[in-house]
Image (spheres, helix red, strand yellow):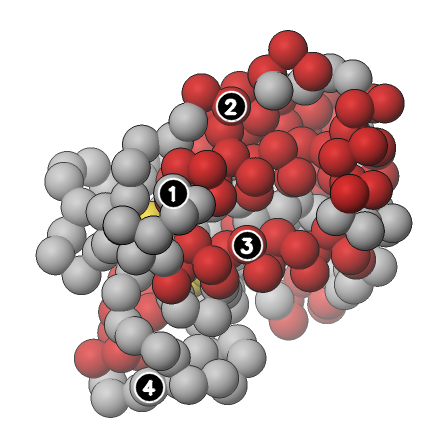
Amino acid sequence: MTRYLMGRTFGRFFLDGLKIRDAKSYRAEIEFLEEQIAHHEGDVEPTASVLNGFVAFTRYCRFLLFGFEDDELETGFGSHKKIKKGLMTREIVDTFLTAPKDFCCPISLDLMEDPVIVSTGQTYDRSSISRWLEEGHCTCPKTGQMLAHTRLVPNRALRNLIMHWCTAHEVPYDPPEGPDSPSETCFPSSSKAAVSANRATANLLIQQLSAGSEYAQTIVPREK
């Protein structure tokens, strides 16, 4: 798969097979796949690494073919009023106009340091969702759906994208280090295809950021 990463024709063929016609359909497919990862059991096919590979490659094809469009864009570029509603801490807003919405935790609205996936496929910062669960909540904060379980799946691909973005913008970023906590589901390491797709996606993002793309600064997928 990796040798085709830069091919638009293959990317279109891949997305056509998934019935993806626009950025909105892409987002729906990614959310579905992420939910499958969150519910995945280690001895069930396809393996978690295969699912992660599909997520990573679908995300790459989305950016390659559709660019940084987003039908659900809510953050107004250049509008401090809209930014304040949502996605960043005050300190970062004072330095940068806006940040990719998917880099920020829906609960705290802060840039995520340790993004994790819950059973509904939504991503939150570990500290925020852990506190939510410790308070006795049993629903997904963003969707209101009941959580099938309380396992937190590390969203390593998204964390890598956040690190790339912070490096490009010289934003201090110090993600936690150390082994996974007992509350996490430990999936196999990412496949070579997933790693290659994530790297290619990060390169596209950095190229758009360097070109001053407004969409690139406000829209980025959640990769697992």
Residue bearing mark 3: 33
Crowding near pointer 4: few (<14 within 10 Å), some, many (20+)?
some
Q: Residue 176 is drawn in which quadrant?
A: top left
Residue at 29% from the left image edge and 44% from the top image edge:
187
Disc 2 versus disc 3: distance between alpha carbons? 16 Å
Q: Is residue 52 above or below residue 139?
A: above
Q: Along the line of sight, which residue is nearer the eye, 58 or 92?
A: 58
Residue bearing mark 2: 193
Amino acid type at circle 4 is: Cys
Residue mark closest to the camera, 1 vs 3: 1
> Are circles 4 and 3 on residues that touch, CB within 8 Å?
no
Residue at 42% from the left image edge and 27% from the top image edge:
191
Residue 57, how many percent across, how many down?
A: 62, 33
Disc 4 versus disc 3: distance between alpha carbons? 22 Å
Residue 28, how many percent across, how many down?
A: 69, 60
Badge 3 marks a residue whose secondary structure is helix
Task: Specify which label sits upstream in the sequence, 2 or 4.
Answer: 4
Task: Specify which label sits upstream in the sequence, 1 or 4.
Answer: 1
Amino acid type at circle 1 is: Thr
Residue 184, how many percent across, how many down?
A: 22, 56
Amino acid type at circle 2 is: Ala
Q: Along the line of sight, which residue is nearer the eye, 68 or 2?
A: 2
Task: Specify which label sits upstream in the sequence, 2 or 3.
Answer: 3
